[in-house]
Image: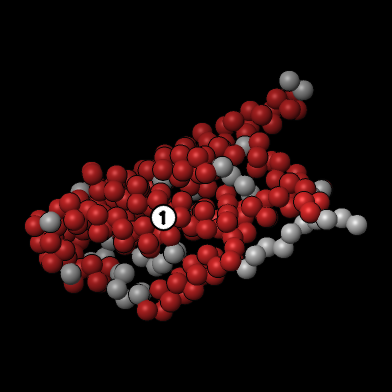
């Protein structure tokens, strides 16, 4: 009869509580906070926000970053608006530093919640699996840095997805933090710079054009960074074919 460590233990319900809480808050956020985390809300309150920033700069930074962290950690709507707000209130720099730091902290929070809730167990099952599942897990493990930077650099990958996938495949926390912080800088700088020019956009009665990231002058360098991230994978595959 198998007992003790040889017998798989059941997952305590508390391990799922973190992900259930995040999912619940995300749904409630979509229902109740969508109007408050919008471009219209930023436009209507811009003068008050600027006045508060001028009178309480350090407090403004702390409150802004705390709000951004919560938005990312609970996958609430408004992450794009938050990034633009960082540029609007604090300029392209140090706004991009505040944005990237807060987004990274929020991403780490949801990463840890996902890993504690189900990620470790899923990663272990993939490691113990066979066939296609095992090959997928091994492929990710062999190219973790490249894959982590790639999902951060590709604009089409939703931010919350890029936070959850690494937790599900057993990526170490240190790698996740480093790849997230540096991987989101390019797009973060673009959107923060757009936010820094929001004053003129609002004066014209317009909304910011977030499709700017798909313009050739911006998209091509991003694709170049994606290709650079994939270069080690390509070299490794080429060496494998040649038997090096």
Left or right placement of residue 239 versus residue 1 in this view: left
Residues 168 and 188: in front is 168
Up/down of 196 relative to 176, above or below: below
Q: Which residue is at a point 52% across and 44% down the rendered structure image?
A: 173
Q: Secondary structure at mark 1?
A: helix
Q: Residue furthest right?
A: 1
Which residue appears farthest toward the top when viewing the image?
A: 244
| Relative side of 153 to 13, left or right | left
Among all residues in the image, which is located at the extreme bottom? 31
Image color mode: secondary structure
Which residue occupies 75% across, 44% down? 135
Q: Where is residue 105? Give x, y as percent.
A: 40, 51
Picture quarter with the C terminus? top right
The residue shown at (45%, 55%) is 109
Taking depth in this image into account, of 15 and 115 the one nearest to the observer is 15
Which residue is at the front of the view, 240 or 160? 160
Residue 130 screen position, x and y as percent: 82, 48
For the N terminus, the image quarter is: bottom right
Report the side of 84 relative to 173 (left or right). Answer: left
Residue 20 visible (yes or no): yes
Does residue 161 appear in the picture of this structure? no
Q: Is residue 50 above or below residue 128?
A: below
Neighbours of disc 1 within 10 Å: few (<14), some (14-19), many (20+): many
- Name the residue that disc number 1 marks: 106
Residue nearest the observer in this picture, 77 or 174: 174
Residue depicted at 23% across the width and 67% down the height: 42
Residue 239 % position (x, y)? 70, 25
Across the whole image, how many numbered discs are drawn on residues?
Answer: 1
């Amino acid at each position: 009869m198998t007992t003790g460590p040889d017998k798989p233990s059941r997952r305590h319900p508390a391990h799922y509580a973190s992900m259930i809480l995040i999912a619940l808050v995300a749904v409630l956020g979509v229902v109740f906070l969508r109007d408050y985390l919008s471009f219209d809300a930023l436009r209507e309150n811009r003068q008050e926000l600027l006045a508060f920033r001028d009178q309480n700069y350090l407090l403004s930074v702390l409150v802004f970053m705390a709000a951004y962290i919560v938005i990312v950690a609970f996958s609430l709507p408004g992450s794009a608006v938050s990034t633009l707000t960082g540029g609007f209130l604090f300029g392209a720099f140090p706004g991009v530093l505040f944005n990237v730091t807060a987004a990274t902290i929020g991403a780490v929070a949801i990463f840890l919640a996902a890993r504690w809730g189900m990620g470790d167990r899923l990663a272990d099952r993939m490691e113990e699996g066979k066939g296609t599942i095992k090959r997928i897990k091994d492929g990710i493990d062999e190219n973790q840095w490249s894959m982590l930077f790639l999902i951060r650099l590709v604009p089409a990958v939703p931010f919350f997805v890029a936070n959850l996938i690494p937790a599900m495949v057993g990526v170490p926390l240190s790698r996740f933090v480093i790849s997230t912080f540096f991987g989101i800088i390019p797009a973060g700088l673009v959107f923060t710079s757009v936010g820094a020019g929001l004053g003129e956009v609002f004066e014209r009665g317009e909304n910011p054009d977030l499709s700017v990231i798909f313009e050739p002058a911006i998209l091509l360098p991003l694709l170049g960074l994606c290709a650079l991230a994939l270069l080690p994978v390509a070299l490794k595959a080429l060496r494998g074919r040649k038997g090096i």
